[in-house]
Amino acid sequence: MRIRIKDPYSRRGETPAYKCSPWLGPRLAVPPALVALLLSLPVSVCLGLPSPGHSDHVEEQSTAKTEVPFELSNHNLIIVKATIGAIKNVNMILDTGTTPTAINQGMADRLNLRGKVGLLQTLNGTIQVQSVVLPCIQIGQLHADSITGVVQDLTFLEKSLGISLGGIAGLDLLRSSSFAIDYRRRKIIFGPVAASEKAVHFETQIPYLSVKAKIAGQEIRLLVDSGTGGLLVYRNRLRTASEQLHVDPNASISNAAGGGTHLRWLSTEVSLEKRNLGARNVVIADVDSNPQDDFDGLIGLATMGFRKVSFDFENGLFSWE
């Protein structure tokens, strides 16, 4: 499947928010015409995995700051080096929109991990995964022992990105330490976060991070997702007249049968709480969200023009530069 988009941001010289990405499609049971758009959504939001009976443990982190370099792939995917068990220099995607942490099937085989088969409720349906107790995982100063995670086949991601992947470090691991993502220097800085004028409170921190926003004059809640590009709102969560939406005939979402639907987007003022982000293009997802989801859309980070973002879990703040 393929997505072809004439960048609606091009007149302002911005990076396109939704380029062809491997981010979900093959793993979810969704209609083919929607797969390409849903590639930009986070991998999963856990709504209850069977526990293998072990207690998760994430060690207390030092108050000193440490830096971990990362590579930015596909304009928005953060890839860091990690140690899983005794295996070092493992490529992991760091994703604030994912929980629980996942490892690739190949990594599970190398570590001889076996667990219980269970169901994982994602943003777009239920998938079958294997729940396991993960060995020590270390990324910089983050150090977790015996946390419950899942095993997933990430072969499609490896092929798309052209690298081997050990897994995806999710919010269950990341929230154990405040941290900042410096996109200019390509560094993750673990440790205390400095106060910033451009900051808003998290509405929720468990099981996902969300913030209050105002789009087209409507108050909504956005999931803060480092694995997503730009802004996306579900069609059933925004009261927008059809004549306000832009449809570009050169921007389409193609399906396997050769047909497709045109990408719809709205140009409007966006703010986080009372912090105005100015005029932005908001993609309207051609899919209805689950009524049980307590958020209305997603906000990415790298393609929003943020040079640096911080996650201050001690004070419950999300900030940006």
Image (cartoon, rainbow, N blue to C red):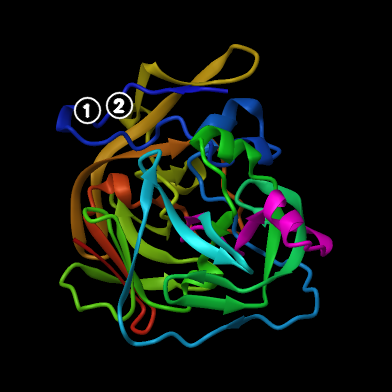
Q: Using the rendered image of the protein, determine whether residue 90 is visible from the camera's viewpoint.
A: yes
Query: Split into 4 quadrants, where in the image is the C terminus?
Result: bottom left
Residue 50, image x and y in percent? 79, 69
**Disc 1: which residue:** 10
Q: Is residue 152 left or right of residue 255?
A: right
Q: Which sits in the foreground, 51 or 91?
A: 91
Q: Is residue 197 above or below residue 8?
A: below
Q: Is residue 109 above or below residue 142?
A: above
| Foreground pick, 128 / 264 | 128
Q: Which residue is mark 2?
A: 7
Q: x, y percentage for residue 123?
A: 60, 51
| Amino acid type assigned to the residue bearing label 2 in the image | Asp
Q: Quadrant of the N terminus?
A: top right
Q: How many marks?
A: 2
Q: Which amino acid type is marked by label 1?
A: Ser
Say left or right for 287 vs 49.
left
| Disc number for residue 221 | none
Element type where label 2 sits in the image: loop
Report if the CB atoms under discs 1 and 2 are less than 8 Å apart: yes
For the record, the magenta segment spans 92-120
Magenta-span inclusion, residue 159: no
